[in-house]
Image (tube, grey):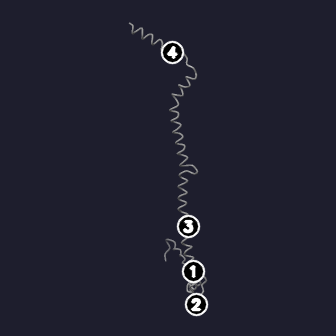
Amino acid sequence: MRDLQMQARTSATASQQRAVPRSLTKRVKDYVRRVWPPAASVAAVAMTLWLGWQAVYEKNGLSAWQQKRVEERQLRKENEDLAKDNARLRNQIERLKSDPDAIGIVIRGTMHYIKPNEVIITLPPNQKTPAPPAGTAK
């Protein structure tokens, strides 16, 4: 019997405690304690995703960096080709300064100069003749 009385008293005090309104600051503190960890986690994940997006797709992001690397490779190759062409032209200039035969070859090829007793024969460019229409007999 005593147990029942004790149980009734404890349940009465528990219900009385629930009925007493808590202060606003306590309720806010409780709410913040319950809500803050999940909200902070969501905010941290959102911030991480946003920073990742910025790092990859924005104006100075990873994709722009990759495009710049491709452009750099193309420009390096173009520079190498131009350097080779410059070296070839310098070599040709040196030969033209010192070799009379090289001068003769260039003059004949570009200006159509000839040596005595030489004849130049100019051929017309290859022209494709149209095929006769189908169904016509020869």
- Whole-Å distance between the Cαs marked 2 and 3? 40 Å
Q: Residue 102's spot in the image, x, y percent?
A: 56, 84
Q: Which residue is mark 4?
A: 17
- Whole-Å distance between the Cαs marked 4 and 2? 124 Å
Give the vertical position of 119 relative to 64 (above or below).
below
Which amino acid type is shown beneath numbered disc 4? Gln
Looking at the image, is mark 2 or mark 3 nearer the viewer?
Answer: 3
Q: Which residue is mark 2?
A: 115
Q: Give 125 or 51, whichever is nearer the viewer.
A: 51
Which amino acid type is shown beneath numbered disc 1? Glu
Which amino acid type is shown beneath numbered disc 2? Lys
Looking at the image, is mark 4 or mark 2 nearer the viewer?
Answer: 4
Crowding near pointer 2: few (<14 within 10 Å), some, many (20+)? few
- Secondary structure under the numbered disc 2 in the rendered image: loop
Q: Give 62 or 23, whichever is nearer the viewer.
A: 23
Which amino acid type is shown beneath numbered disc 3? Asn
Q: Are marks 4 and 2 in contact (CB under 8 Å)?
A: no
Question: Residue 21: which quarter of the image?
Answer: top right
